[in-house]
Image (tube, rainbow, N blue to C red):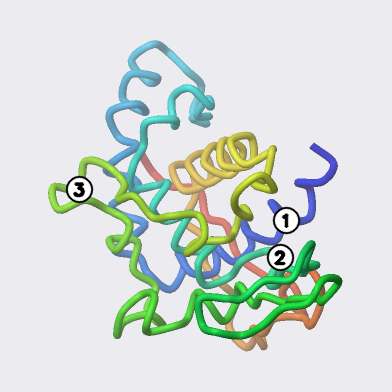
Amino acid sequence: MLAARDTVGTTLTWIFYNLAQNPNIVSIIRNELSPIASNKVAAGVDAMVIFEPDETKSLVYLKAVLYETLRLYPPAPFERKTVAADDIMPSGHELGTGDTILISLHSMGRMEGLWGKDCLNYNPDRWLSEDGNKLKYVPSHKFLAFNSGPRICLGKDIAVMQMKTVIASTLWNFDVEVMEGQSIQAKPSCILEMKNGLMVKLKKRGM
Protein backbone atom coordinates (compact mmCIF):
# COMPACT_ATOMS: atom_id res chain seq x y z
CA MET A 1 0.00 0.00 0.00
CA LEU A 2 2.84 2.41 0.84
CA ALA A 3 4.63 1.67 -2.44
CA ALA A 4 1.50 2.51 -4.42
CA ARG A 5 0.92 5.92 -2.84
CA ASP A 6 2.98 8.09 -5.20
CA THR A 7 2.29 6.08 -8.34
CA VAL A 8 -1.48 5.99 -7.78
CA GLY A 9 -1.64 9.68 -6.91
CA THR A 10 0.43 10.62 -9.96
CA THR A 11 -1.66 8.49 -12.32
CA LEU A 12 -4.94 9.94 -11.03
CA THR A 13 -3.63 13.45 -11.73
CA TRP A 14 -2.90 12.60 -15.36
CA ILE A 15 -6.24 10.77 -15.70
CA PHE A 16 -8.33 13.74 -14.58
CA TYR A 17 -6.26 16.07 -16.75
CA ASN A 18 -6.88 13.94 -19.85
CA LEU A 19 -10.55 13.40 -19.07
CA ALA A 20 -11.07 17.15 -18.71
CA GLN A 21 -9.83 17.48 -22.31
CA ASN A 22 -12.16 14.70 -23.54
CA PRO A 23 -15.77 15.24 -22.34
CA ASN A 24 -16.99 12.57 -24.78
CA ILE A 25 -14.94 9.97 -22.88
CA VAL A 26 -16.39 11.20 -19.58
CA SER A 27 -19.89 10.69 -21.01
CA ILE A 28 -19.08 7.09 -21.95
CA ILE A 29 -17.75 6.38 -18.45
CA ARG A 30 -20.90 7.84 -16.90
CA ASN A 31 -23.09 5.73 -19.18
CA GLU A 32 -21.17 2.66 -17.99
CA LEU A 33 -21.71 3.71 -14.38
CA SER A 34 -25.39 4.60 -14.80
CA PRO A 35 -26.94 1.15 -14.10
CA ILE A 36 -24.91 0.78 -10.90
CA ALA A 37 -25.74 4.30 -9.75
CA SER A 38 -29.44 3.81 -10.49
CA ASN A 39 -29.52 0.71 -8.29
CA LYS A 40 -27.79 2.55 -5.47
CA VAL A 41 -30.20 5.51 -5.68
CA ALA A 42 -33.18 3.14 -5.72
CA ALA A 43 -31.80 1.52 -2.58
CA GLY A 44 -31.94 4.89 -0.85
CA VAL A 45 -28.31 6.06 -0.77
CA ASP A 46 -27.47 9.66 0.07
CA ALA A 47 -26.99 12.31 -2.61
CA MET A 48 -23.31 11.39 -2.93
CA VAL A 49 -22.94 8.10 -4.81
CA ILE A 50 -19.82 6.16 -3.80
CA PHE A 51 -18.87 3.13 -5.87
CA GLU A 52 -17.45 0.06 -4.16
CA PRO A 53 -14.52 -1.98 -5.58
CA ASP A 54 -16.71 -4.99 -6.42
CA GLU A 55 -19.07 -2.70 -8.36
CA THR A 56 -16.35 -1.28 -10.60
CA LYS A 57 -14.52 -4.56 -11.15
CA SER A 58 -16.40 -5.45 -14.35
CA LEU A 59 -16.34 -1.95 -15.91
CA VAL A 60 -14.42 -2.51 -19.13
CA TYR A 61 -14.34 1.01 -20.58
CA LEU A 62 -13.21 2.55 -17.30
CA LYS A 63 -10.30 0.12 -17.21
CA ALA A 64 -9.45 1.00 -20.83
CA VAL A 65 -9.31 4.68 -19.82
CA LEU A 66 -6.95 3.80 -16.98
CA TYR A 67 -4.66 1.72 -19.20
CA GLU A 68 -4.59 4.40 -21.90
CA THR A 69 -3.42 6.93 -19.32
CA LEU A 70 -0.75 4.52 -18.07
CA ARG A 71 0.42 3.98 -21.67
CA LEU A 72 1.06 7.69 -22.26
CA TYR A 73 1.90 8.69 -18.68
CA PRO A 74 3.47 5.72 -16.87
CA PRO A 75 4.02 6.74 -13.22
CA ALA A 76 7.43 5.05 -13.30
CA PRO A 77 8.68 6.38 -16.69
CA PHE A 78 11.72 4.12 -16.98
CA GLU A 79 12.94 0.69 -15.88
CA ARG A 80 16.48 -0.22 -14.88
CA LYS A 81 17.65 -3.80 -15.41
CA THR A 82 20.98 -5.50 -14.75
CA VAL A 83 22.16 -8.29 -17.04
CA ALA A 84 22.54 -11.54 -15.07
CA ALA A 85 24.53 -13.40 -17.74
CA ASP A 86 26.03 -12.77 -21.18
CA ASP A 87 23.32 -12.72 -23.80
CA ILE A 88 22.36 -11.45 -27.24
CA MET A 89 19.24 -9.35 -27.76
CA PRO A 90 16.81 -10.14 -30.62
CA SER A 91 18.17 -6.98 -32.25
CA GLY A 92 21.66 -8.52 -32.31
CA HIS A 93 23.10 -6.32 -29.56
CA GLU A 94 25.50 -8.18 -27.29
CA LEU A 95 25.06 -7.88 -23.52
CA GLY A 96 27.66 -8.64 -20.89
CA THR A 97 27.14 -9.78 -17.31
CA GLY A 98 26.59 -6.78 -15.06
CA ASP A 99 25.62 -4.42 -17.89
CA THR A 100 22.81 -1.98 -17.09
CA ILE A 101 19.80 -1.60 -19.37
CA LEU A 102 17.51 1.43 -19.15
CA ILE A 103 14.05 1.04 -20.70
CA SER A 104 12.02 4.19 -21.33
CA LEU A 105 8.38 3.26 -20.75
CA HIS A 106 7.44 6.84 -21.55
CA SER A 107 8.97 6.49 -25.02
CA MET A 108 7.57 2.99 -25.59
CA GLY A 109 4.04 4.28 -25.05
CA ARG A 110 4.56 6.74 -27.89
CA MET A 111 6.16 4.42 -30.45
CA GLU A 112 4.29 4.11 -33.74
CA GLY A 113 5.76 0.65 -34.28
CA LEU A 114 4.04 -0.58 -31.10
CA TRP A 115 0.79 1.41 -31.01
CA GLY A 116 0.10 2.54 -34.57
CA LYS A 117 -0.06 5.90 -36.32
CA ASP A 118 -2.34 7.35 -33.64
CA CYS A 119 0.14 6.50 -30.88
CA LEU A 120 0.16 10.09 -29.59
CA ASN A 121 -3.64 10.30 -29.36
CA TYR A 122 -5.54 9.62 -26.14
CA ASN A 123 -7.82 6.82 -27.32
CA PRO A 124 -9.17 4.25 -24.81
CA ASP A 125 -10.86 2.36 -27.65
CA ARG A 126 -7.50 0.90 -28.66
CA TRP A 127 -7.79 -1.39 -25.61
CA LEU A 128 -11.23 -2.74 -26.48
CA SER A 129 -12.34 -5.75 -28.51
CA GLU A 130 -14.35 -5.09 -31.67
CA ASP A 131 -17.67 -5.45 -29.83
CA GLY A 132 -16.38 -3.29 -26.96
CA ASN A 133 -17.36 -5.86 -24.35
CA LYS A 134 -13.88 -6.86 -23.19
CA LEU A 135 -10.28 -5.76 -23.18
CA LYS A 136 -7.89 -6.87 -25.89
CA TYR A 137 -4.94 -8.98 -24.82
CA VAL A 138 -1.81 -6.84 -24.70
CA PRO A 139 1.38 -8.62 -23.56
CA SER A 140 3.09 -7.17 -20.51
CA HIS A 141 6.40 -6.78 -22.39
CA LYS A 142 4.61 -4.28 -24.67
CA PHE A 143 2.72 -2.49 -21.87
CA LEU A 144 5.25 -2.27 -19.04
CA ALA A 145 3.42 0.06 -16.66
CA PHE A 146 3.23 -2.81 -14.14
CA ASN A 147 6.56 -4.37 -15.17
CA SER A 148 6.67 -7.88 -16.67
CA GLY A 149 7.54 -11.49 -15.94
CA PRO A 150 8.59 -12.53 -12.41
CA ARG A 151 9.03 -8.85 -11.49
CA ILE A 152 5.44 -7.87 -12.33
CA CYS A 153 3.92 -5.50 -9.76
CA LEU A 154 2.42 -7.39 -6.83
CA GLY A 155 0.06 -4.51 -6.12
CA LYS A 156 -1.33 -4.23 -9.67
CA ASP A 157 -4.85 -5.42 -8.84
CA ILE A 158 -5.06 -3.26 -5.71
CA ALA A 159 -3.83 -0.17 -7.57
CA VAL A 160 -6.30 -0.70 -10.43
CA MET A 161 -9.13 -1.22 -7.93
CA GLN A 162 -8.25 1.95 -6.02
CA MET A 163 -8.02 4.11 -9.12
CA LYS A 164 -11.24 2.79 -10.68
CA THR A 165 -13.25 3.50 -7.53
CA VAL A 166 -11.81 7.02 -7.19
CA ILE A 167 -12.41 7.86 -10.86
CA ALA A 168 -15.94 6.44 -10.83
CA SER A 169 -17.01 8.22 -7.63
CA THR A 170 -15.48 11.54 -8.71
CA LEU A 171 -16.87 11.59 -12.25
CA TRP A 172 -20.36 10.51 -11.22
CA ASN A 173 -20.69 13.18 -8.55
CA PHE A 174 -18.71 16.07 -10.05
CA ASP A 175 -17.78 17.85 -13.24
CA VAL A 176 -14.01 18.34 -13.26
CA GLU A 177 -12.73 21.50 -14.94
CA VAL A 178 -9.02 22.21 -15.34
CA MET A 179 -8.27 25.84 -14.50
CA GLU A 180 -6.90 27.90 -17.39
CA GLY A 181 -3.46 29.41 -17.54
CA GLN A 182 -1.56 26.45 -16.12
CA SER A 183 1.71 25.11 -17.46
CA ILE A 184 1.13 21.37 -17.78
CA GLN A 185 4.43 19.51 -17.99
CA ALA A 186 6.05 16.45 -16.50
CA LYS A 187 8.64 16.79 -13.76
CA PRO A 188 11.97 15.05 -14.52
CA SER A 189 11.95 12.40 -11.82
CA CYS A 190 11.74 8.66 -11.15
CA ILE A 191 7.99 9.33 -10.75
CA LEU A 192 6.19 11.08 -13.63
CA GLU A 193 4.57 13.82 -11.56
CA MET A 194 3.17 17.07 -12.93
CA LYS A 195 5.85 19.69 -12.35
CA ASN A 196 3.42 22.34 -11.07
CA GLY A 197 0.60 20.10 -9.90
CA LEU A 198 -2.91 20.39 -11.33
CA MET A 199 -5.51 22.95 -10.28
CA VAL A 200 -9.09 21.96 -11.03
CA LYS A 201 -12.57 23.19 -10.18
CA LEU A 202 -15.14 20.63 -9.00
CA LYS A 203 -18.80 21.35 -9.65
CA LYS A 204 -21.49 19.14 -8.11
CA ARG A 205 -23.50 17.45 -10.83
CA GLY A 206 -27.27 17.71 -10.91
CA MET A 207 -28.70 14.19 -11.11
The Cα–Cα distance between marks 1 and 2, rounded to whole angstroms, is 7 Å
Pointer 1: what residue?
Answer: 7
Residue beneath the point at 77% across and 69% down = 80
Question: Where residue 108 sits in the image (x, y, percent)?
Answer: 53, 77
Q: What element carries label 2?
A: loop
Residue beneath the point at 47% across and 48% down = 171
Picture quadrant of residue 156 = top right
Near-viewer residue (81 or 119): 81
Do tag 1 and tag 2 residues touch (Cβ < 8 Å)? Answer: yes
Pointer 2: what residue?
Answer: 76
Question: Where residue 58 sits in the image (x, y, percent)?
Answer: 37, 31
Q: Give the amino acid at mark 3.
A: Gly
Question: Where residue 122 sits in the image (x, y, percent)?
Answer: 39, 73
Residue 169 lies, with reference to residue 190, above or below; the image says above
The Cα–Cα distance between marks 3 and 1, rounded to whole angstroms, is 28 Å
Q: In the displayed image of the protein, which residue is found farthest to the left?
A: 131
Residue 163 lies, with reference to residue 79, above or below; the image says above
Categorize mark 1 by other alpha carbons within 10 Å: few (<14), some (14-19), many (20+): some
Q: Give the amino acid at mark 2.
A: Ala
Residue beneath the point at 62% across and 88% down = 181
